[in-house]
């Protein structure tokens, strides 16, 4: 029985091969028209390709749409990131504009001085010594020396205390650097009153000039400059202005309280004064 089935299968296969050869032979002949069998076979193949191709194109379109969707999502994320950076960009622009303005002010003030200056920037400040000292980005290699005065565009702020190759440590006049080392002159109209800084009143945030004669007229708003008579600071540097005048505890002299022209809590751009040794007080 199995042998008979196998034989029938062989006959069917042979018959199919013969039919295929016959179709190929007909198709290779030079004819102007096709047979019904060829037309039926062509239509069947075309229909089969259309049926098979439809789901393939459908699946291909799905993958294409998914790919485009992921691409759009990535692009949207990139745009969202850029939008989120806009406030930071505006902040950076504002910060740079403010910094440029400070630099222009420093150059303008520096150009008006009779001393050569070395422009510098503050690169370090200690939190617990914020109002006492800071470090600048210029040092011995730039011509900085100990004892040089340091100014902001507004006025005197300190003195160079230690010098390294490419940086320097500046002590502010709010510390003991001003005690018995900073002589000043107070301008009241045409009159000039001389004195020396005794200390910095941290509670009031003011420098104190003591032992001023009671006969001297000093009023709030009077400008205060270095006199160069005592200490290491040269003459003519703006210190600040008088904001308060009081008699001492014995009523024998006056004390003048000076508001610094520079803001000790906000120091960024500074310039160090190079000066001729002849400008020192005797």
Image (cartoon, helix red, strand yellow):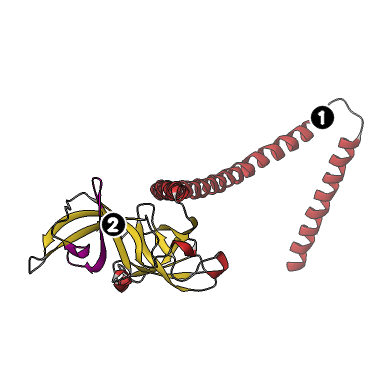
Q: Is residue 264 magenta?
A: no
Residue that sits furthest to the left in the current view? 250
Instruction: Count residues near mark 2 (Cα–Cα under 10 Å), then give few for <14, some for 14-19, many for 20+.
Output: many
What x and y, as percent, mark residue 255? 16, 62
The answer to whether residue 80 is seen in the rendering is no
Q: State which quarter of the image contains the C terminus.
A: bottom left
Asked if residue 199 is among those painted magenta in the image, a careful observer would answer yes
Q: Which residues are magenta?
A: 187-212
Q: Locate residue 144 relative to residue 12 in the image: left or right.
A: left
State the residue position of label 2.
185
Q: Could you tell me which residue is drawn at 23 percent across and 50 percent down?
A: 222
Q: Nearer the viewer, mark 1 or mark 2?
A: 2
Task: Tell me the residue at 50%/50% (across/down).
Answer: 74
Q: Nearer the viewer, residue 127 or 141?
A: 141
Q: Is residue 212 visible to the viewer in this orientation of the structure?
A: yes
Regarding mark 1 in the picture, which secondary structure is present there? loop
Report the residue at 7% width, 69% height from top. Answer: 250
Q: Which residue is mark 1?
A: 34
In this view, 229 is above or below 85? below
Q: Position of residue 59 (x, y in %)?
A: 57, 47
Q: Nearer the viewer, residue 154 or 186?
A: 186
Instruction: Give the structural element (helix, strand or loop) at label 2.
Output: strand
Q: Residue 236 occupies which quadrant of the picture?
A: bottom left
Residue located farthest toward the right when viewing the structure as drawn: 30
Give how far apart the Cα atoms at labels 1 and 2 are. 120 Å
Determine the main secondary structure of the stretch shown in magenta.
strand
């Amino acid at each position: 029985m199995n042998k008979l089935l196998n034989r029938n299968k062989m006959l069917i296969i042979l018959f199919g091969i013969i039919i295929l050869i016959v179709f190929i032979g007909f198709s290779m002949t030079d004819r102007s028209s096709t047979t019904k069998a060829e037309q039926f076979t062509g239509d069947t193949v075309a229909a089969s390709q259309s049926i098979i191709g439809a789901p393939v194109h459908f699946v291909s379109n799905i993958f294409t749409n998914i790919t485009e969707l992921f691409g759009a999502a990535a692009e949207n994320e990139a745009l969202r990131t850029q939008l989120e950076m806009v406030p930071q960009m505006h902040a950076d622009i504002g910060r740079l504009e403010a910094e440029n303005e400070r630099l222009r002010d420093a150059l303008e003030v520096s150009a008006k001085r009779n001393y050569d200056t070395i422009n510098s920037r503050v690169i370090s400040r200690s939190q617990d010594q914020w109002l006492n000292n800071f470090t600048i980005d210029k040092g011995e290699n730039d011509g900085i020396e100990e004892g040089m005065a340091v100014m902001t565009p507004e006025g005197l702020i300190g003195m160079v205390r230690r010098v390294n190759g490419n940086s320097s440590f500046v002590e502010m006049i709010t510390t003991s650097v001003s005690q018995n080392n900073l002589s000043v002159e107070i301008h009241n109209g045409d009159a000039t009153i001389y004195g020396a800084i005794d200390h910095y009143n941290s509670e009031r945030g003011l420098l104190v000039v003591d032992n001023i004669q009671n006969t001297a007229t000093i009023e709030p708003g009077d400008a205060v400059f270095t006199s160069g008579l005592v200490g290491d600071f040269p003459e003519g540097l703006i210190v600040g202005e008088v904001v308060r005048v009081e008699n001492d505890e014995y009523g024998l002299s006056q004390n003048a309280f000076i508001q610094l022209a520079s803001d000790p809590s906000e120091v960024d751009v500074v310039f160090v004064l190079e000066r001729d040794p002849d400008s020192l007080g005797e």
